[in-house]
């Protein structure tokens, strides 16, 4: 008996009508995959990240969590956290942060599921298989749904795109650090081990 390997694209998009509860159950029953859902209802299935990207993701999340715990201004989230954006999309940024007063305005039930809120800060780390165009569209979606600051770290091109509400995207070539500005006051992301 021969076995055959089938190569799937890095992400797979399917149009499937799922209720919020069905989407939640799908994610809970298939924890080895990352799922997102677009505002129009397309299901996006993403395999786990590669080890190198996962290592960089945890370095980012750790820096954000240390600052967040010390400042006590809000809550930090890693890439396994999903949010239901105002436009209906379910997204999972690689790292994110929500101001404490906005988080505490949610019910306990809302906090336990895919919180119906767009984070104040979002970060996407481009992995080798990620489409830059798709990540840029995702960053714009975050901004349109209420994010105040976003960083798209593009290791492949050694640059960072900074997204701010109502402003043009700023591009930094191979920066050593990134400032959280007034959204994450006092936070500085050290990019030495990330870029």
Image: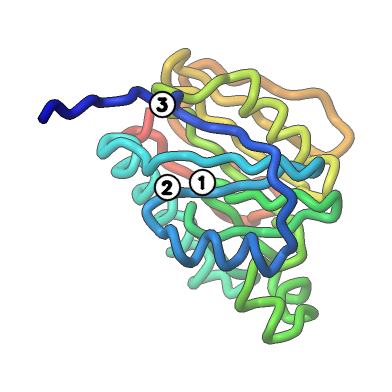
Residue ID at (58%, 75%) = 72
C-alpha separation, residue under disc 3 versus residue under disc 2 = 28 Å
* Front-most of residues 168 and 129: 129
Tag 3's secondary structure?
Answer: loop
C-alpha separation, residue under disc 1 versus residue under disc 2 = 9 Å
Give percent across and percent down for residue 84: 73, 58
Tag 1's secondary structure?
Answer: loop
Give percent across and percent down for residue 127: 42, 28
Q: Is residue 64 above or below residue 156?
A: below
Q: Which mark is residue 94?
A: 1
Q: Is residue 43 toward the left or the right of residue 17 in the image?
A: left
Residue ID at (36%, 39%) = 49
Q: Are marks 3 and 2 in contact (CB under 8 Å)?
A: no
Residue 140, by quadrant, is top right
Residue 100, by quadrant, is bottom right
Residue ID at (53%, 50%) = 95
Q: Is residue 29 toward the left or the right of residue 143 in the image?
A: left
Q: Are marks 1 and 2 in contact (CB under 8 Å)?
A: yes
C-alpha separation, residue under disc 3 versus residue under disc 1 = 22 Å
Select label 3 or label 1 by which is in front: 3
User: Which residue position is annotated with label 2?
Assistant: 60
């Amino acid at each position: 008996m021969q076995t055959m390997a089938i190569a799937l694209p890095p992400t797979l998009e399917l149009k499937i009508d799922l209720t919020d509860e069905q989407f939640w159950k799908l994610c809970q029953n298939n924890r080895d995959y990352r799922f997102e859902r677009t505002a129009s209802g397309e299901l996006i299935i993403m395999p786990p990240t590669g080890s190198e990207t996962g290592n960089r993701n945890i370095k980012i999340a750790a820096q954000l969590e240390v600052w967040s715990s010390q400042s006590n201004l809000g809550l930090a989230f890693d890439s396994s956290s999903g949010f239901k954006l105002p436009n209906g999309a379910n997204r999972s940024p690689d790292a994110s942060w929500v101001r404490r007063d906005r988080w505490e305005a949610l019910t306990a039930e809302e906090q336990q599921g895919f919180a119906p809120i767009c984070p104040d800060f979002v970060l996407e780390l481009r992995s080798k298989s990620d489409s830059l165009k798709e990540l840029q569209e995702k960053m714009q979606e975050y901004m349109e749904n209420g994010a105040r600051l976003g960083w798209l770290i593009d290791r492949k091109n050694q640059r960072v795109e900074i997204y701010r509400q109502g402003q043009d995207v700023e591009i930094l070539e191979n920066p050593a650090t990134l400032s959280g500005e007034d959204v994450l006051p006092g936070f500085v992301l050290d990019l030495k081990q990330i870029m």
